Amino acid sequence: MTSSFADSPTAIAKRLFAAIEAGDIAAVEELYAPTIVIWHNYDGVEQSLSENLRTLRWLTRNVTDLRYEEIRVLETPGGFVQQHVLRATGPGGVRLEIPACMVGTVNDGQITRIDEYLDSAHVRRLMARS
């Protein structure tokens, strides 16, 4: 799943979320620039590549039936904006429904930054069961 410079930012976004749904962390890593920064509104933390991949590995090991639904994605001059609802079954069988918005910056066919916006109550619910 190698990224092409000809891929549109929305095509790259589609491939990113498909890879996460499939639990294909290697494909996610290919889409990310080595210097990517992932920022979360709910904690103000900026994650590095390795920190985010660790989070995604935890997610794919502890959450089942993970899927992105109600997707709306728009191309922007520097990347994409995607709104979606993440639905899954979390640890202990808790049903998750997490509305989110991701703002991605794409440069030379790779994602260089993601700003992730979601309600912290959803994160607490997921983490309380882990």
Image: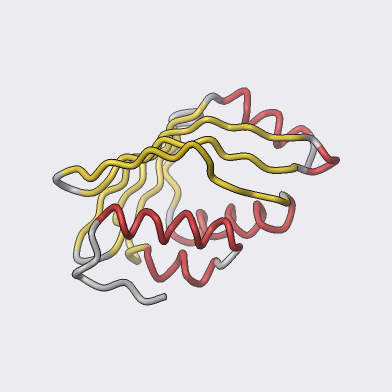
State the residue at coordinates (26%, 55%): 9
Looking at the rendering, which quadrant does residue 102 occupy? top left
* Front in this rendered view, residue 75 or 48: 75
In the image shown, does 7 or 27 lie closer to the viewer? Answer: 7
Image coordinates for residue 6, horizontal then vertical, percent: 19, 69
Which residue sits furthest left? 77
Q: Quadrant of the C terminus?
A: top right
Q: Residue lying at the far right in this picture: please name it.
A: 92
**Which colour style is shown?**
secondary structure
Instruction: Tell me the residue at 72%/49% (across/down).
Output: 63
Count of numbered circles on the image? 0
Q: Is residue 125 left or right of residue 11?
A: right
Residue 25 place in picture, x, y as percent: 54, 66
Q: Quadrant of residue 94?
A: top right
Residue 112, given in percent of the width and then of the height, sits at 29, 56
Please provide percent x and percent y for residue 54: 58, 58
- Residue extending farthest to the front is 70
Left or right of residue 109: residue 97 = right
Looking at the picture, tell me which residue is in the foreground, 104 or 55. Answer: 104
Figure quadrant of residue 48 = bottom left
- Specify the quadrant that holds the N terminus: bottom left
Q: Please give the name of the residue rendered at 49% of the width and 36% of the height, measured from the top-left corner.
A: 70
